[in-house]
Image: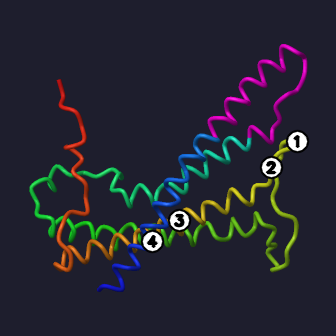
């Protein structure tokens, strides 16, 4: 069990590193969006084209990357949406058991299905033709637009990282359920919220 917990810790470190670096990506997304808005209005005033389709697409590419790659970090931090009105009175071991089975029966198969369903469209966007040869990759239909293949690949990367984090969570839930480690893996959500007035 010690080896599995070390694997889970390594996956947690990966998810945490990616999650924390995404805060800078969000800042970059806001900066690109701010530039796009300012350039559009100043350009209109000056009669110049200061923005481009590439910059507009870059803005939603950056947002999409932040969105797709944040799910493992959210899961690792326990910030995902939970229905815990029943769970509030359960012991930590019972919560870990329910979370383990939920992860194994629902989250892991969902990630595998997501990887399987998106693999062919992503490969086709990179230029894989039906006969197995390679052609040109998919590009934006807009003038000066960006290639579509890299952003579509982020869907695969997102599902892959979420699958890794789901496996890490399952290992930790199993360890708590079987008594290998003590403590709570699920944060107390109510303790963080201010009282209702």
First along the sequence among labels 1 and 3: 1
Give the magenta range: 29-56
Q: How is this picture coloured?
A: rainbow
| Residue bearing the label numbered 3 | 159
Indicate which label's residue lies in the foreground, 1 or 4: 4
Q: Position of residue 34 (x, y in %)?
A: 67, 29
First along the sequence among labels 1 and 4: 4
Name the residue rendered at 83%, 17% in the picture: 44
Separation of marks 2 and 3 at Cα, in angstroms:
23 Å
| Residue bearing the label numbered 4 | 11
Relative height, residue 27 to residue 86 (above, below): above
Q: Nearer the viewer, residue 117 or 60?
A: 60
Q: Nearer the viewer, residue 120 or 163?
A: 163
Separation of marks 1 and 4 at Cα, in angstroms:
40 Å
First along the sequence among labels 3 and 4: 4
As helix, strand or loop, the secondary structure at mark 3 comes to: helix
| Residue bearing the label numbered 2 | 146
As helix, strand or loop, the secondary structure at mark 1 comes to: loop
Separation of marks 4 and 2 at Cα, in angstroms:
32 Å
How many neighbours does mark 2 have within 10 angstroms: few (below 14), some (14-19), or many (20 or more)? many
As helix, strand or loop, the secondary structure at mark 4 comes to: helix
| Residue bearing the label numbered 1 | 143
């Amino acid at each position: 069990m010690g080896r599995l917990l070390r694997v889970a810790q390594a996956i947690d470190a990966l998810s945490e590193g990616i999650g924390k670096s995404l805060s800078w990506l969000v800042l970059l997304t806001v900066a690109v969006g701010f530039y796009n808005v300012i350039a559009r209005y100043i350009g209109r005033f000056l009669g110049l084209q200061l923005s481009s389709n590439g910059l507009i697409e870059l803005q939603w590419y950056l947002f999409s990357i932040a969105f797709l790659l944040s799910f493992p970090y959210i899961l690792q931090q326990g910030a995902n949406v939970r229905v815990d009105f029943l769970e509030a009175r359960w012991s930590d071991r019972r919560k870990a058991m329910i979370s383990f089975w939920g992860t194994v029966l629902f989250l892991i198969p969902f990630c595998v299905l997501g990887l399987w369903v998106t693999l062919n469209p992503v490969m086709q966007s990179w230029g894989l033709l039906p006969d197995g040869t390679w052609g040109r990759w998919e590009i934006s239909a807009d003038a000066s637009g960006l290639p579509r293949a890299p952003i579509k690949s982020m869907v695969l990367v997102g599902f892959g990282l979420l699958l890794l984090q789901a496996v890490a969570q399952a290992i930790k839930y199993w360890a708590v359920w079987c008594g290998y480690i003590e403590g709570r893996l699920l944060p107390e959500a109510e303790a963080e919220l201010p009282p209702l007035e």
